[in-house]
Structure formats: C-alpha cells, structure tokens
Image (cartoon, rainbow, N blue to C red):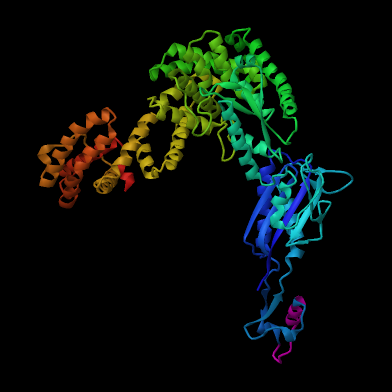
Amino acid sequence: MMQAVDFLVELGTEELPPKALKKLAEAFLEGVEKGLADAALSYEAARYYAAPRRLAILVEQLATQQPDRSTQIDGPPLQAAFDAQGNPTKAAEGFARKCGVSLDEIDRSGPKLRYLQNQPGQPAAQLLPGIIDAALAALPIPKRMRWAARKTEFVRPTQWLVMLLGDQVIPCELLAQSAGRESRGHRFHHPDAVTISAPTSYAEDLRKACVVADFAERREMIRQRVEALAAEQHGTAIMPDDLLDEVTALVEWPVPLVCSFEERFLDVPQEALISTMQDNQKYFCLLDANGRLLPRFITVANIESEDPAQIISGNEKVVRPRLTDAEFFFRQDQKQPLESRNERLANVVFQAQLGSVYDKAVRVSQLAGWIAAQIGADAGRAARAGLLSKCDLASEMVGEFPELQGIAGYYYARHDGEPEDVALALNEQYMPRGAGAELPSTLTGAAVALADKLDTLAGIFGIGMLPTGSKDPYALRRAALGVLRILIEKQLDLDLGQALEQAVAQYGDRVKADGLAAQVQEFVFDRLRARYEDAGVEVAVYQSVRALAPTSPLDFEQRVMAVQAFRRLPEAEALAAANKRVANILAKDDASVAATIDAALLQEVAERTLAAAVGQAQARVAPLAAQRQYQQALEALAALREPVDAFFEQVLVNAEDQTVRANRYALLASLRGLFLGVADISMLG
C-alpha cells in the first residue's frame, strides 16, 4: 500500500509586484502540478497561496514514492544477433553493453533481442526539490533580479524557504535559501519567525501571525468590508476586478478605512478624479445613488493601527496634490475655446501618409454630416461635432489623463455652450469602446462614431496596412465590429458601400482608391460572420444572405433573422432542396432565360398550377420584400412547397421541344427570383 502525506512549499521574498502576484501564483501551481504528473506522483488536491511576501503551494495526500516502472528495450533481430553456429555477434554484445548487463540476462524468446529494465520508484522527497526548482524557473517573469553577491535570479530577492513533506523538512537549497520549517509573519505586527507545524496548518499558523495567506479569502474580505463601509457613507464603491486584485496583492492583513477630500474638487470632471485615485493611489471611489462621486474614498491599509486617524490623514494629504493637479488642468483648459486647439492638431501626425490629426477631424466632420443626412440626424450638428472631435487631444487634461479622451471634450464643449448632442458626440465617437460596451446614445454621436471608424478603415486599408493574423495596430477589426453594432443594434439604415465611397473620395490621392471601398466593405461584412456564429446563427444562414451582397448591415441583419425563422418551418427543407435543384438546372443552361412565362406554352397540369402559384406569390411577396418584411415574405413563399414538389415529380424540365423547355426554365427562374428577393436559400440544403 503506497503511503501519502501532505506537502507544503513556501518561498518568502521581498514584496512581489502586485499586478503580477496572482498570475505568478497560478503559474507556480501549474508548474508544480505538471512536475508531479511527469514524475507519476499521485495526489488528491493542490492549491496556491499568495501574499505580498510569499508564494506557496499545498499538495494534499501526495504519494511518498513513485510507482516502480518497467521499460522494454528492443535489440537487433535474432538472425543478426547470432551466427550459424549460435555464437553471439558484435551486434548482440553491443546491445548487452548498452543495457549494462550480460548476454545471459537478455530475453531471446521473440524475433528480436529484448531487455526488460525495472526502474524502482524514487522517494518523493528526492524528486520534489527538482520539481519545485523547475516550476520556479518557468514562472512568467519579464525581468529577473540579482541581489547581494549571488548569481541566483528571481523576480524579487528571496528571504526564506519552507519545504515540508508530512512533518519532515526536505533538506535542499533553492534560490539561495536553505529549506526549513520557519516562515515569517506580518512585517510590522509579527516580524518574528513562525514555525509551520504541518502543511495543512500553514494558513492557520500564519493567520495567528497577522497574515491572511489565501489570496481569494483576502480579496473577499476586502470586497465585503469596502461594500459595508460604502453603505455606511450612503454610497456604493467602484471596484473594478483588476483594481481589487492589485489591492489584494498589496496587503497581508487588510484594513479598509474611509477617507475624504474637499468638496470643491467635485467641480472637476469626476472621471478625472476617479482615474487618478484608482490608478495612482489604488483607492476605491464612492458614488451616490445618482452615480455622482462622493467626496470620500476607501484606502486599504496593511496594518491594524492603534491610531487609524493617522493613516487616514496621511492618505488625505497624499491625494490632495493629485486632485489639485486635475483641478489646475481643468481650469487651464477652460480658458480657451475647445475649437482653438485644432491649430495645434495641424502639427500632430495621425499617420505619416494620411496627414495630421486636424486633417482627420475635417474628414470626419464632412463624412459625419453626410452620414447624418442618411440616418435622419442633424447634418450641421454632426459636422460640428466632427470638427471638434479631436480637439481635447491637445488639452492639458488629456495630456495628463489619456484615458479621458472624449470625456474631457464633452465637458469643454458644454462649457463653451455647444448643443448637448454635439458635446455628447465628442465622447460617443469612441463607442463602443470594446466588445459588448455601450453604444452612442445620440444620432449625432452615432454619425461621428461611424465617420471616425470608416475614415480610419478607408485610410489604413488605402495605404495597404491590412491587419494580419495577430497584428492589428489600428484596431481595424474593432472599428469594423463597432460600425456593425451601431448600425444593427440602433437600427440605422446606411448603405455601407456609398458611405465608404465618400470616405475614400475625401482622401484624394493619398490612398490607392481603385477597388478600395469594395475591399473595406468585404472586410466589414466578414466580421458579421463571427458575430452570427457567437449568436448561434448557422454559417449557412449567413452565407445565404451574403450571396446577395446587401450593402446595408441593418438590411443584412433583417434578412438573416428572416432566414433563421424560415429554417424552423416544416416546408423549409424541401424548398431549400428545390432551390438547390433549380440553381443547378439554371447554371447548366448557357442560353439566357426569358424574363416572362408564356402561358400558352404551359402543357402539364403541374406546371400550370406552379405558374399560377408563382404569379400569386409575386403579387403577395413583392410588397412585403419592398417593406423589408422578409420573415412574412418567406412565410408566404412556404405555400409553394406542394406545387414545387408536384412540378418536379410530374414535369420533365428538359422537354424535347426547345420552346417548351425554355419556358419551363423561365418558370423556374421566376420561382428562384422570388426567394432571391430575401436570400439564396439553396445554400441551406
């Protein structure tokens, strides 16, 4: 019976980089588990611990010994191993030497010489130092450090090492530390050594020394306490996941405290205050019930202070200069109108071949005005917003807080007395900012957002800088998806082909215009395929619409939804198959098919019935398709199933008489034309 005991390794270090702590711990665990698997050491469970000064792995019920393994080594064939007299050849002697045994120990019962080598399993205690060493060496550390006069390197200088298998220390040295059973507690509350009595008591032994070693537990403690303190202040805390992870990685013994700042700072755009408090100070900001910033924030101390007021006032002192800077930039920027900054942008390059940022603003302005007219927005206001769209890039505020581009423009435009939708458009031009992010709320904003993205697509494609598999420096895929989402989700009807022709024309001879609009349009509609796949729409449905090349994404979407609904009808399969058959018949015929059906040439009952049904369907479906009621159109066409089936059963399409045959082709072409008013459903078969 193989024995199993718990195993613990803890590497103590100087403070680890907070943004990387969780990733380091996860990678350490992965490396240890891989090493154990490669060594065939079984265990029940493994988990990591991670705090600012330590990375640890606990493995429960680890086998103390590898299982014995036998490997079979095949040698030369028997006829090559012995001569006619039965004496061993050089090949046989060489094989025995390679196996490190005499020829008598080699098995010669099969067609080849064979040696079974039994490898007794090694004790886990001998293997673990190598496994841990390899896992540490494989950690994703961009820059390793050396310290003192040592040659060893790690992300931070190491301080101690605990390695326990059961209750025994595994004697070894890793990263300049000799293994023992002594860890250390909290840097201030319990700087002395902490003896780890057994691997499973690790977390409790450290908790008594004011260290919460479990990353997830510490994170949850912080989250709950911050939420409770925020509620006491009649607010809610902004807790982005990555900020919560970073704060968790900065403290061993978390103590959240409420601090405040002067109310006068609330005159500054709250996005700037939140940005500086989160990014620079790692504070959690508080919002009131209306989503407005409260003059409070929560800091997470790493110490249970006897005088928390000291810590609070220290944090309040530190944050004041930051907020004062933001206030200063905001006031400075407002001293001159937003529009005047375009002068500075005339000297800032957007892209070397495509001109300055000001040139881009002028193009966006003209294109936004054109788009606004198409989608029922105010062309003058869209053009105005386009002209101001890049101005805040030359502001002090965006210089200091780049993430406020668009937001700063909104505040300055309002300050200058621009209409509300023009001001909003300056921020909405960047929407959607990522997958699933919010869309512009105004039509003016939608026009500018579309113009900005289409201008970038036309320009970057126009100088041949197409995105490759992994590289897309101008985020062209995101721009294309953004265009599609705005048009489809906001139900805006825009002919993308025409819009792109406008965008290309504005560049003049800066781009290779030939075929460019069509190339970009293809790229944009290709992005729809992935969008539909994610939404569970089959590729065949997408392709049946793509075959007709609609130029309005909204129209494309309406057709796809109609085909998706049509697929569920009982008649769908038979009609898709019939369409495929018709398409194949018509494809084989080189002669041009007549546009009208000659009733006098209809001989069989089934073809007369079908012709009558097609005629009725045309009268019914044409107005539906014209109003884009595609689903109702396809539902009406479902009634053709019976006459179509009957036609193919009873009528020979390729009749002897050439005029009769041509007339039947014309009938099939008009049948197919009905469906092609919505999609090419032959592709569904």
Quarter of the view holding residue 464: top right
What is the magenta range?
83-98
Q: Is residue 92 magenta?
A: yes
Q: Residue furthest bottom?
A: 85
Classify residue 156 as left or right of residue 408.
right
Q: Above or below — where is 57 with respect to 248?
A: below
Q: Above or below — where is 387 with respect to 112?
A: above
Percent of width and height locating residue 137: 74, 51
- Frontmost residue, 514 versus 21: 21
Percent of width and height locating residue 100: 77, 78
Q: Residue furthest front?
A: 306
Quarter of the view holding residue 673: top left
- Frontmost residue, 415 versus 498: 415
Percent of width and height locating residue 108: 67, 85
Total numbered labels: 0
Whether residue 399 is visible, yes or no, is: yes
Percent of width and height locating residue 384: 50, 12
Q: Is residue 554 magenta?
A: no
Kindly identify the residue that appears in the image at 67 percent across and 61 percent down.
Answer: 36
